[in-house]
Every structure is written in C-alpha cells, then in structure tokens.
Amino acid sequence: MNQQAQVGVPTPWGTMRARLECEIAALEARGDAAGAASLRDTLENWWTQQMEWNARAMESLSVHHEINNALVGVRGNMQLLLMNPEVKQLGIRERLEVVLRESSRIQEAAGRLGELKAEFGGPPADSRAA
C-alpha cells in the first residue's frame, strides 16, 4: 500500500517508491526481467520495513494526545487555584503562575509532536486541548 496515496501529500519515502517503480518499469521495458524482479524484491522488502518503522513512529508520536489530556487537568486546576483569594499569600501565586507558564511550554511541545504525527499521515493535532 502506497502511503503517498493514503495521505494525499507526497512523503519522501512515497516519492522514492514511485521513482523505484518507474525504474522497475524501465528495466522491464529494456527486457531486463531479472534486474526488474531483483529491484522489485528489494523495493518490497524496504517498503515493508519502512511501513513498520512508520507505524512505530506514529505510535510514539501519539503521546502528544496523552500529554494534552493531562495538561487540561493541570492547567484547569491551576486556573481555579489562581482565582482563590487565599492564593495571595506570599509566593504562592507566583509559584502557581510558574506551573501554568511551564505547562504552556509543555503544551506547545506536545503540539509540535502532533504536527509531526500529521506529517506521517496521522490525524491532525487536536487544538482543543488545554
């Protein structure tokens, strides 16, 4: 299965596969059936390994969703705490604001993971979280 067709956007490996398929066709057209068969076997072995690697990468990149879900709880609770009048005690508000600010950095990093996942053909990053 050609990932390029799945996504609709050419991937480097999808482009390479298409080029190699053209080379196989050229070998066949020149009458080099053995060379074409050898290249086809190599291509299919590489493609299988590439798709397995892509699946593992997609699984790893899916962590962005879990991070965003956890951040929803952290950020929501921090915002509630900051609304509490007791937070005005010395240093507490500042510490809570640091947690909120740093959670924003984590959220941005998780968003970049989601964008990378989308480049691999996964669903786009969910911008609704946190």
Image (cartoon, grey):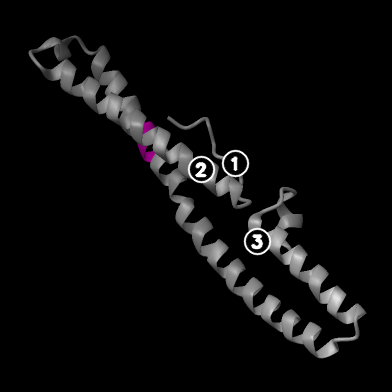
In the picture, measured across the screen, residue 61 lies left or right of residue 92, that is: right
Residue at (86%, 74%) from the top-left corner? Answer: 25
Residues under numbered marks 2 and 1 in contact, where contact means CB atoms less than 8 Å apart: yes
Kind of residue at disc 1: Pro
Is 124 situated above or below 40?
A: above
C-alpha separation, residue under disc 1 versus residue under disc 3: 20 Å
Image quadrant holding the N terminus, namely bottom right
Query: Which sits earlier in the primary sequence, circle 2 or circle 3?
Result: 3
Residue 112 % position (x, y): 47, 39
C-alpha separation, residue under disc 2 versus residue under disc 3: 20 Å
Residue at (32%, 31%) from the top-left corner? Answer: 103
Name, please, the residue furthest toward the front.
30
Q: Main secondary structure of the magenta part?
A: helix
Which residues, given as a range, are shown in magenta?
A: 69-73
Residue that badge 1 annotates = 124
In the picture, measured across the screen, residue 64 lies left or right of residue 126, that is: left
In the picture, measured across the screen, residue 29 lies left or right of residue 59, that is: right
Name, please, the residue furthest toward the left.
90
Which mark is drawn over residue 13?
3
Kind of residue at disc 2: Gly
Query: Looking at the rendering, which quadrant does residue 47 occupy?
Result: bottom right
Which element carries disc 3, helix, strand or loop?
helix
Within-10-Å neighbours for mark 3: few <14, some 14–19, many 20+: some
Residue at (56%, 62%) from the top-left corner? Answer: 54
Query: Which sits earlier in the primary sequence, circle 2 or circle 1?
Result: 2
Query: Which sits earlier in the primary sequence, circle 1 or circle 3?
Result: 3
Total residue callouts: 3
Q: Nearer the viewer, residue 36 or 41?
A: 36
Within-10-Å neighbours for mark 1: few <14, some 14–19, many 20+: some
Residue 57 % position (x, y): 50, 59
Which mark is drawn over residue 114?
2
